């Protein structure tokens, strides 16, 4: 498969702050640049990548998008999913107006790092609908415990907005949390405007070697409920280093999708991403 990576992070520690990485030795000690990404994926087929905002410190989220804008068009980067603050009207429309000049293909606000009330806020819902009117998708980053509550409520309310569920809803694989997660994912998948990102799963496994057999029930459930037309691939690099790593996740992906037809694999690898994010290719 020629993969389109819809979830490539960058950590540019000399220019931006990443307080969330404190206490995570694999991420806290260095930067992770496009050159590092290219070295880790060498020999594997990545057709293009979309840089995903990396939850930088609150003072830096606009600056992050403006820095990444200078990388779009280089090293296979075709655009970015930028951070935003839809819970506030202040400057929101102006930030969207700046987006085309920054190579923005969509937006994200990490909603598991704020109170659940933020996802329920009427201002946030109204501003997400403004994204929909502009034809821009919004990535949802929730913990598994939030899927049946604030996540489902938001998805129901924003039915005119293209939404993407990151990391398959962050299942607690290492804790054996399949049942509640599967129930909530099934409820979310009934909403056709929601796609699901096959990314980040090994970071939610127990420590140790990662194998396809552990992940397969989760991947099969997502594919069964969403269908390949609404599933897309992402690396979640360098957070993937907390699990199998970039190369390991790519190898696992090939195993996990082996039971699909070539056409179905192509949709997960690139087709869904092209439809949702509409990169300039």
Image (spheres, rainbow, N blue to C red):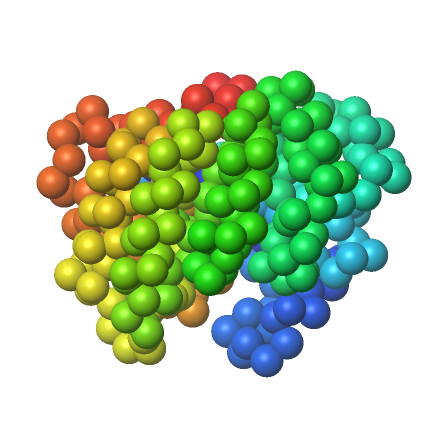
State the residue in front, 86 or 30: 86
Which quadrant holds residue 178? Answer: bottom left
Instruction: Evaluate whether residue 200 shows in this view.
Output: yes
Q: Position of residue 102 (x, y in %)?
A: 71, 31
- Residue at image position (32%, 72%) is 174
Instruction: Evaluate whether residue 49 shows in this view.
Output: no
Which quadrant holds residue 170? Answer: bottom left
4 vs 215, left or right, is right
190 vs 61, left or right, is left
- Residue at image position (61%, 54%) is 111
Q: Quadrant of the N terminus?
A: top left
281 vs 265: above or below? above
Q: Position of residue 242 (x, y in %)?
A: 43, 69
- Residue at image position (75%, 60%) is 57
48 vs 205: above or below? above
240 vs 233: above or below? below
Which quadrant holds residue 3? Answer: top left
- Residue at image position (63%, 57%) is 116
Q: Position of residue 227 (x, y in %)?
A: 27, 32
Q: Position of residue 273 (x, y in %)?
A: 42, 30
62 vs 5, left or right, is right
């Amino acid at each position: 498969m020629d993969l389109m990576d819809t979830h490539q992070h960058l950590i540019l520690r000399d220019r931006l702050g990443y307080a969330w990485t404190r206490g995570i030795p694999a991420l806290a000690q260095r930067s992770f640049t496009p050159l590092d990404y290219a070295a880790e994926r060498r020999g594997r087929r990545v057709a293009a990548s979309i840089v995903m905002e990396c939850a930088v410190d609150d003072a830096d989220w606009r600056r992050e998008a403006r820095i990444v804008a200078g990388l779009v068009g280089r090293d296979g980067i075709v655009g970015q999913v930028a951070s935003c603050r839809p819970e506030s009207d202040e400057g929101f429309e102006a930030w969207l107006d700046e987006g085309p000049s920054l190579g923005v293909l969509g937006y994200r606000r990490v909603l598991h790092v704020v109170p659940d009330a933020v996802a329920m806020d009427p201002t946030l819902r109204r501003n997400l609908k403004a994204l929909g009117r502009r034809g821009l998708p919004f990535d949802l980053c929730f913990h598994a415990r939030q899927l049946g509550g604030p996540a489902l409520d938001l998805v129901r309310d924003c039915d005119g907005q293209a939404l993407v569920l990151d990391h398959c809803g962050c299942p607690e694989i290492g804790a054996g949390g399949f049942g509640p997660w599967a129930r909530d994912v099934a409820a979310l998948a009934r909403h056709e405007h929601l796609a699901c990102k096959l990314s980040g799963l090994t970071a939610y496994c127990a420590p140790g070697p990662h194998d396809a057999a552990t992940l397969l029930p989760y991947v099969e459930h997502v594919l069964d409920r969403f269908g390949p037309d609404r599933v897309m691939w992402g690396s979640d690099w360098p957070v993937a280093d907390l699990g199998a790593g970039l190369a390991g996740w790519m190898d696992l992906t090939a195993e996990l999708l082996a039971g699909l037809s070539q056409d179905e694999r192509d949709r997960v690898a690139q087709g869904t991403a092209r439809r949702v994010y509409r990169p300039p290719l």
